[in-house]
Amino acid sequence: MAHTLAQKAVVGRRIAFTYYRDLKLAQPPAHPGIITSVTEDKASLRIRLDGKRYNLAARTDYQGITYLDEVVPVPVLPMGRFIPTGDDLLGVWEGVPLSTIGEDGEDLILLAADRDKAVAAAQAYDREVGVHPDSANYDRIRAFWAVFEWEPEDAETPWTVRWDAAEGDEKAVRIHYLPA
């Protein structure tokens, strides 16, 4: 059986992947993806789920993988500047996409041109993660023009943000930044 799985475990093979945490569910979700590489590691498969920019590592015999018949070229990930959405960041609070950045992940970037909306989103996020309202100084929030750039697939982070943008630059967006 392992020999058959090794034959199916090829770069470009489409798969359906179920996370370990979901395997005991009555109807576990199966996420479509593709094998991007096969290594010599024990967890030799690198799998990119559709719509994601990172790889998961898995064994060829992991019970949560269903090998599909289709083998296709691995799609190249887009690189360069992009305009992020809530799916690219942590999510959306009060209608504003936001993410954490910084060495400790405590600074906030909020994709909102309107300062009041940015502050409302920061407050909603802080409430959700348990930050005490008195410990955040929302007066420190500042507006910037910024550009986001995709990083290579195996980079430490999927994207970076550059602060040296100006209004009118290609794919520049107005953000608000709240340092911790």
Image (cartoon, rainbow, N blue to C red):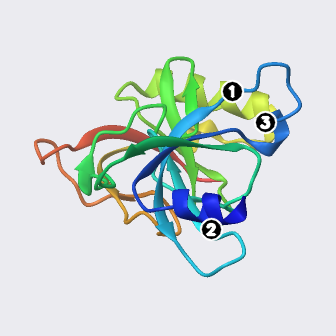
Q: Is residue 165 visible?
A: yes
- In the shown orientation, is residue 119 left or right of residue 58? left
Examine the rendered structure and indicate whether residue 27 appears above or below residue 137: above
Q: Quadrant of the N terminus?
A: bottom right
Dot 1 or dot 3: first in sequence order is 1
- Is label 3 in a helix, a strand or a loop? helix
Q: Position of residue 51 (x, y in %)?
A: 44, 39
| Residue visible at 70% across and 38% down in the picture | 18
Q: Is residue 130 visible?
A: no
Residue at which label 1 appears: 29
Residue at which label 3 appears: 129
Q: Position of residue 67 (x, y in %)?
A: 57, 45
The kind of residue tagged 3 is Val
Examine the rendered structure and indicate whether residue 41 appears above or below residue 37: below
Other residues around mark 3 within 10 Å, as few (<14) / some (14–19) / many (≥20): few
Residue at which label 2 appears: 103
Label 1 or label 3, whichever lies nearer to me, is 1
Q: Nearer the viewer, residue 111 or 1?
A: 1
The kind of residue tagged 2 is Glu
Examine the rendered structure and indicate whether residue 40 appears above or below residue 89: below
Q: Nearer the viewer, residue 11 or 81?
A: 11
Give the farthest residue toward the right: 24
Dot 2 or dot 3: first in sequence order is 2
- In the shown orientation, is residue 45 left or right of residue 42? left
Rounded to the nearest whole Å, what is the CA distance between mark 1 and mark 3?
27 Å
Examine the rendered structure and indicate whether residue 84 appears above or below residue 160: above
| Residue visible at 66% across and 42% down in the picture | 137
| Residue visible at 67% across and 54% down in the picture | 106
Other residues around mark 1 within 10 Å, as few (<14) / some (14–19) / many (≥20): some
Q: Position of residue 119 (x, y in %)?
A: 55, 28
